[in-house]
Image (cartoon, rainbow, N blue to C red):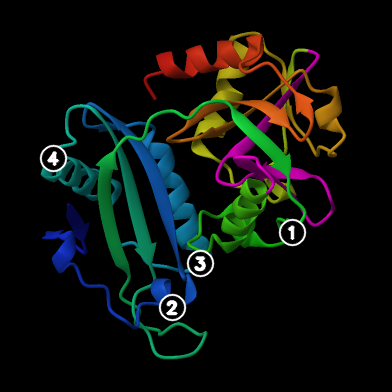
Amino acid sequence: MRLWLDGALVDAAAARIDPADRGFLLGDGLFETMRADGGRVVRLARHLARLRQGAGALGIGLALDDDAIARALETTLEANGQGRGGAALRLTLTRGPGPRGLLPPSDASPTLMIAAFALPPLRPPAQAVIVRGVARNQGSITSRLKGLGYLDNILALREAQAGGSDEALLLNAAGRLACASAANLFLVADGRLLTPPPEEGVLPGITRGRLLELAPTLRIACSERPLEPGAIDAAQEAFVSSSLGLVRPVARIGSRLLPAPGPVTARLTAALLADPG
C-alpha cells in the first residue's frame, strides 16, 4: 500500500508519523471516509466542505486548496491500483506534533494523510439494538464533527455484538435516538422519512444530507426532529446510511422485526445508486 503523506507518496511500511503528533496522542484531528467510483470521489465537494468546516471549528490549518486535495486523492487511488473500479479513501488531518499538554502550539504544522482501499462489499440488513452503556453528548460540538475520537462508537458496537446484534443505536444524553455506531439513523413511519437533527448529537452525514434532498423528488415526505426510543414501535421501516455503506436496511431493532428493505427504503436506495453525486 502507498500513502499520500504531507505532499508525497510513500510506502505504508516506510511512512512515519511523529510520535508527538497530537492526532495520535490526543485525538486532535478530523477524518473523512469517501467512496470512489471509476477514479472519481463521490460527493467530493461535500466531503471537503465538511472537512474545512470542522478544521475551522477546531482551528486546524489546511494549507491545500480543494483542487490540490482532489489531485492528492486521485494520485493515491492510482498509486494503489484503485483508479478504475470502486474504492474507499480515508483522509486524516491532525493538528500535527506539539509539546506535552493540552494547549496546541502557536506554530502547529498539521499532518495530512490519505489512504486508499478496496471498496468493502455492502453488508446484509442490520440486526440492531439500542445500547445503554454510552450516550451521545448533544451539547458538545464534537458530536457534530467527524473527529478522530471514536471510543464511544467502539464501545457501543462491542456492547451490541456482545448481545448478539451487529449494529448499535445510540441515545443522546437526553435519552432520545441519535445515530448508529458509524452511520446515521432513519425511520419510516406512515410513509414519512424521519431522522434526528444534528442538534441531537448527530454527525451531519454526507449520504444523510443527499437522502434528505432526494426524498422530496420522490414525493417522500421527510423531517428532521427529535425522536424518542418509542418512535421505533411506530416505524414500519428503518435504515442507516453512510458514505461507504450507502443505505443499509435494518431488519431488527431489539425484538421488533422490520422489512429489510421496506418500500420507502428501496426507493431511496435506487435513487441514491442512480445519483451521480
Q: Nearer the viewer, residue 198 or 251?
A: 251
Secondary structure under tag 4 reads helix
- Depth check: give the residue in front, 263 or 5: 263
Judging by the rendered image, the residue that carries numbered circle 1 is 133
Residue pictured at 66% horizontal, 53% vertical: 159
Q: Position of residue 122 (x, y in %)?
A: 43, 28
Q: Earlier in the sequence, mark 1 or mark 2?
A: 2
Whichever of callouts 1 and 3 sits on the residue coming sooner in the sequence is 3
Ranked by sequence position, the earlier of labels 4 and 3 is 3
- The answer to whether 95 is drawn above or below residue 4 in the figure is below
With 215 as the anchor, is 147 left or right in this view? left
Q: Tell me the CA gap for discs 1 and 2.
A: 25 Å
Q: Residues within 10 Å of mark 4 (few under 14, many from 20)?
A: some
Task: Identify residue for label 3.
Answer: 58
Q: Which residue is mark 4?
A: 78
How far apart marks 1 and 4 lie (CA) works out to 42 Å
Which region shows up in magenta?
163-190
Three-letter amino acid code at the position of disc 3: Leu
Kind of residue at badge 1: Gly
